[in-house]
Image: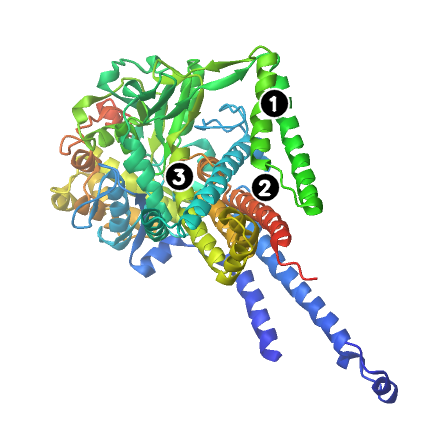
Amino acid sequence: MNVPQNQASTKKVAFFNNPANRAVIYQALLMVGLGYFFYTIISNTLANMEARGIKSGFDFLWGTAGFDILMSLIPYEPTDTYGRTFIVGMLNTVLVSSIGIVLSTVVGFVMGVAYFSHNWLIRKIATVYVETFRNIPLLLQVFFWYFAVLSALPSARQSLSLGEAIFLNVRGLYLPDAVGEPGSGVVYAAIAVAIAAIALLRRWAKRRQALTGKQFPLLYATLGLLLGLPLIAFLLMGMPFHWDYPALKGFNFQGGITIIPELMALALALTIYAGAFIAEAVRAGVQSVPHGQTEAARSLGMKEKQIMNLIVVPQAMRVITPVLNSEYQSLVKNSTLSTAIGYPDLFTVFVGTTLNQTGQAIEIVFMTMAVYFVFNMLISVAMNLFNKRVALVTK
Amino acid sequence: MKTKWTWAAAAVAATSMMANAQAGTLEGVKSKGKLSCGVSTGLAGFSQKDEKGGWSGLDVDVCRAVAAAVLGDANKVTYKPLTAKERFTALQSGEIDMLSRNTTWTHTRDTSLGLNFAGTIYYDGAGFMVKKELGVKSATELDGANACIQAGTSTELAIADYFRENKMKYKAVTFDTSDQTRSGFESGRCDFLVSDQSQLYALRIGLKNPAASVVLPEVISKEPLGPVVRQGDDAWFNVVKWSVNAMIEGEYQGVTSANADGMRANGKPGQKRLLGSEGDLGNKLGLSDKWAYNIIKQVGNYSESFERNVGQGSPLKISRGLNAQWSDGGILYSPAMR
């Protein structure tokens, strides 16, 4: 942008011909143009809506909803507001997306690593899994799990049961719930202490290994702390929990934890579909590490597990992480297929029923788009931070 | 540079012009030569597609009646199947000219959606269907049960009110289409299915074993179903409103598709006025004199349409009940045709 001194001194450049000035002017003009464009669209839409007698604005959020929602993570009654249906739907979206992200990562890594197994059967299972589920439309998979698999389960009165504690029927999966009594807080505190202790221990062990080369049995220590501390607290406090078992009362099972089939079907479909893509990414990541590295590590006398953990995975993660990012984002967006089976997420509840009852399509669609946008930006930011940690550090 | 500015100016001009789109649906339909009518995705008796791709039903007959009145040919209709969730947006955006899709006339819809209800074609009310094996005799025994409901319907609100009134609890399992709602009920996902009474009979026929399910006696809400048009287009609103009235008045006057020709030539004054051989009722709507004649000749009067689609001539066998003429103990009443 800087004009060389000698030229500037000999020949004065006209204001408009100065590249720096021109850049500013054109950008300002573009901004004004864009601003005017969006202003026109928005004011036009509002004027048209008013002319046709369609209500606009966000006042509707405080109106009484008057309909029931199948599943809610916060207390919800039909007498609550439309605004609350937004929150209920959003939390259900967060729930199914989180389950999908965690499980698809597990499935994807297991299947991606299984591809390199020395066992022929395991290798083939991984290949068949990836090739099958990657190539079937997700909507069909959602339908398959919901209408073909879960709808074929027996009715409430003929539930499949496991030890009269866990029940499975067409209405969902019923699990016993551990209900805390006074003193249960100590057990939760013990879990928190255990996690903090593990983090400190790992740092200490890493430093010790760097200094002395001595290794510490981290896995056993971690497991011991995680199970041992809460167990001790549990016994000391006199077992401050009791089980709330589901039981058939009237039409339905009452008590315990209910997992509705809509959630199961959607989470299953999302997990298995995204898992197939993640498995491919993991395979590609592992293959991107040159074989010479494995051989070099082997010749240094490292164990196979160490080669995987210390040589292959850290390098493979550089390839896998960007793909994971976009897979997680797709998964969140794909969760809107909920509407096909009526899982009460943001899309079904808010863009479905609330939109229909209030008719305020523009506001509702805008709010919903903003939510998915923010969710995906958050995932993107988190994954980019993670990517920075695993990326190749050049010195 | 010059071309860029031209483009920008054109874009701004284009957005400003959108304001004046779609006035005059009547002229639009006449010039297109086709009526675009929103119907359901498939509901026995109201709007359903046969094997050959033709549509039939009470709601479809309203579309056909309007096409007959405006274009002189009841077959000049393009049907747009819509789910309950899509229907109002399709009408507001101008994708369809009118909506005839078992839609309940409610205060909120009439006043806040920029739409007008052009009459009632079927007086309905929400009711319950349960499996016989449950042994439920009345809706008051349904405390704690699961309900299968179609998403985005006024039934969703009616049932919440009913259960609150009776201090009972329920769980709403919602589905996108009525077929999915039925398969949800059939698979046992819910204990009962709640919908308009007319739909219950229609859905019951579609069950694998209709005899195993029973419709409960309770009717818990008012659900007057009728055609809907956009607000602010009074000429078109009048056309749809009076097309419905012509079918009702046709029955009242005793005009049928079979005797319409004879009555048009030498009927009573009221019959002749309806059929256009006297007066100029058609002209006042911006239609030909034969508007109502075409409706009754090609589609039939209300009674013919009712019996063919949902009444004794159909598998549904619904009796007229509230939907009889006011002179026969029902509440069907067309304003004066003069």
B141 displayed left or right of A316 = left
Q: Name the secondary structure under disc 3.
A: helix
Spatial CA span between label 2 and label 3: 38 Å
Foreground mark, 1 or 3? 1
Question: Is B287 above or below relative to A25?
Answer: above
Tell how many labels: 3
Question: Is B138 above or below relative to B257?
Answer: above
Say yes or no: labels 2 and 1 on the same chain. yes
Across and down, in percent, residue A299 comes to 53, 57
Amino acid on which disc 3 is placed? Leu
The one nearer the camera, B50 or A288, is A288
Across and down, in percent, residue A372 comes to 54, 46
Chain that bears disc 1:
A
Report which residue position mark 1 lands on. Answer: A229
Image quarter hosting the N terminus of chain A = bottom right
Amino acid on which disc 2 is placed? Gly
Q: Name the secondary structure under disc 2.
A: loop
Foreground mark, 2 or 3? 3
The one nearer the camera, B321 or A10, is A10
Spatial CA span between label 2 and label 1: 54 Å
Query: Which mark, by number, is residue A57?
Result: 2
Across and down, in percent, residue B203 comes to 24, 31
Q: Is there a contact, CB below 8 Å, between mark 2 and mark 1?
A: no
**Whether residue B239 is visible:** no
Query: Which mark, by number, is residue A268?
Result: 3
Q: Name the secondary structure under disc 1.
A: helix
Amino acid on which disc 1 is placed? Leu
| Residue appearing at x 44%, y 19% in the figure | A176
Instruction: Name the N-terminal-most of marks 2 and 1.
Output: 2
Across and down, in percent, residue B21 comes to 47, 58
B258 displayed left or right of A242 = left
| Residue appearing at x 54%, y 59% in the figure | A296
